[in-house]
Image: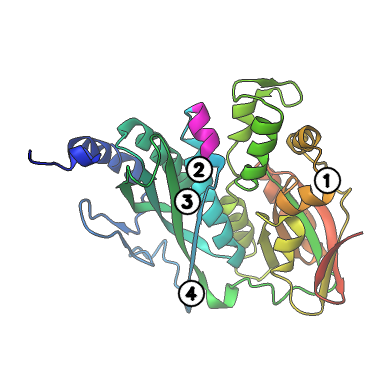
């Protein structure tokens, strides 16, 4: 019987090493002065505060905020198109957008990439997108893990998971407890499906309608693949700008990231007892990608609203006297926003008027 090697089992360590050699530059471009470089170490190092007096945060009671998420079956679209960088942006967005709902400054991000086989080029594309997302979110790509598992994943398949850690001073923690009757509800535009509902999207687009990723969609002026791979908006910079603008005042009473479950379910998560939100569903324009999908699949309105963000990727709740300033800062980041509802006294719920 001949001697068996790891390569015989489906893992080529030489190719793996080549893949790993491509990643440090993508990490280093995300580093801030708070990162303590430890290339080749077993962990990433990050100092909570700056050594420089000029940039110190001077935390009084820091609270760490941690989030984890994946990209879901949107990865199947990436595999069909052989475009893998945009899902890296999605990976960062899904966790970072959750972290900022607590008012946190995203500090660091780590990724987990599980692949069917060693593929340095594909891995580099994925991590390029993760690196781009971290730059957009102002957080450091501190490290990660790549696992090669040929017996778990079919050839060409892979999966992603991301992990974000942020920090917020306890006195500025946003947990929804300050939401009160009279507050306005501001919806901030999404870029499309983001990273939710893709099992339904794929069933309708590919199985029912029989479309391919290279087919052109006149309503969207894009191919199917381009439309479905539009990355999730990362809201970290505009939210951080709003928080910084008010110099520590707790102006934002609540923030909700609109993901699976849609607007109603995710907004209700941050409401305190005795607060009811009334939403006007005609107050914003639903992007054409949603009406296109709904028409293809004959999906009922209630199902669409339950599965998708319907054009609202983030919700901010605050006293209406701050509306003009907040919307102006969102516009500075090319983000449209709409007053979509208000908080009234009543049983905790989100209802459509």
Q: Disc 1 to disc 3, how far (Cα)?
A: 39 Å
* Other residues around mark 3 within 10 Å, as few (<14) / some (14–19) / many (≥20): some
Element under disc 4: strand
Q: Earlier in the sequence, mark 1 or mark 2?
A: 2
> Camera-side residue: 131 or 7?
7
What's drawn in magenta, residue-wise? 75-81
Residue beneath disc 1: 300
Element under disc 2: helix
Snapshot quadrant of residue 16: top left
> Camera-side residue: 304 or 332?
304
* Other residues around mark 4 within 10 Å, as few (<14) / some (14–19) / many (≥20): some
* CB-based contact (under 8 Å), mark 1 and mark 2: no
Residue 36 percent location from the top left of the image? 28, 58
Residue beneath disc 4: 63
Snapshot quadrant of residue 346: bottom right
Question: Is residue 23 positioned above or below 271 on the image?
Answer: above
Residue 261 appears left or right of 73 = right
- How many numbered marks, from 0 up? 4
Q: Disc 4 to disc 3, how far (Cα)?
A: 18 Å
Residue 167 percent location from the top left of the image? 48, 67
Can you tell which of label 1 and label 3 is closer to the viewer?
A: 1
* Picture quarter with the C terminus: bottom right
Per the image, is 76 magenta?
yes
Question: Is residue 334 positioned above or below 256 on the image?
Answer: above
Question: Is residue 105 positioned above or below 310 on the image?
Answer: below
Residue beneath disc 2: 89
Can you tell which of label 1 and label 2 is closer to the viewer?
A: 1
* Other residues around mark 1 within 10 Å, as few (<14) / some (14–19) / many (≥20): few
């Amino acid at each position: 019987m001949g001697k068996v090697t790891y390569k015989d089992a489906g893992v080529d360590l030489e190719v793996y090493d080549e893949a790993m050699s491509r990643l440090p530059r993508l990490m280093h471009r995300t580093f801030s002065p708070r990162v303590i470089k430890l290339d080749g170490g077993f962990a990433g190092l990050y100092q909570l505060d700056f050594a420089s007096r000029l940039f110190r945060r001077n935390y009084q009671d820091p609270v760490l905020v941690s989030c984890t998420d994946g990209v879901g079956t949107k990865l199947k679209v990436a595999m069909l198109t052989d475009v893998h960088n945009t899902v890296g942006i999605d990976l960062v967005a899904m966790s970072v957008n959750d972290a900022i709902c607590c008012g946190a400054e995203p500090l660091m991000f780590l990724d987990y990439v599980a692949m069917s086989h060693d593929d340095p080029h594909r891995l580099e594309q994925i991590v390029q997108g993760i690196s781009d997302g971290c730059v957009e979110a102002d957080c450091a790509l501190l490290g990660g893990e790549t696992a090669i598992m040929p017996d778990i994943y079919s050839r060409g398949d892979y999966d992603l998971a991301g992990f974000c850690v942020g920090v917020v001073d306890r006195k500025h923690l946003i947990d929804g407890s300050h939401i009160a009757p009279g507050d306005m509800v501001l919806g901030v535009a999404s870029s499309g499906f983001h990273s939710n509902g893709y099992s339904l999207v794929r069933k309708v687009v590919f199985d029912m309608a029989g479309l391919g990723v290279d087919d052109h969609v006149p309503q969207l002026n894009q191919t199917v693949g381009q439309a479905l791979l539009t990355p999730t908006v990362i809201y970290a910079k505009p939210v951080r700008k709003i928080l910084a603008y008010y110099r520590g005042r707790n102006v934002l009473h609540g923030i909700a990231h609109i993901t699976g479950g849609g607007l109603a379910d995710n907004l209700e998560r941050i409401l305190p007892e005795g607060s009811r939100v009334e939403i006007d569903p005609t107050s914003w324009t639903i992007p054409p990608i949603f009406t296109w999908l709904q028409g293809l699949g004959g999906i009922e309105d209630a199902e669409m609203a339950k599965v998708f963000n319907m054009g609202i990727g983030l919700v901010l709740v605050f006293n209406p006297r701050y509306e003009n300033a907040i919307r102006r800062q969102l516009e500075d980041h090319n983000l449209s926003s709409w007053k979509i509802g208000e908080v009234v006294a009543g049983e905790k719920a989100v209802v459509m008027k």
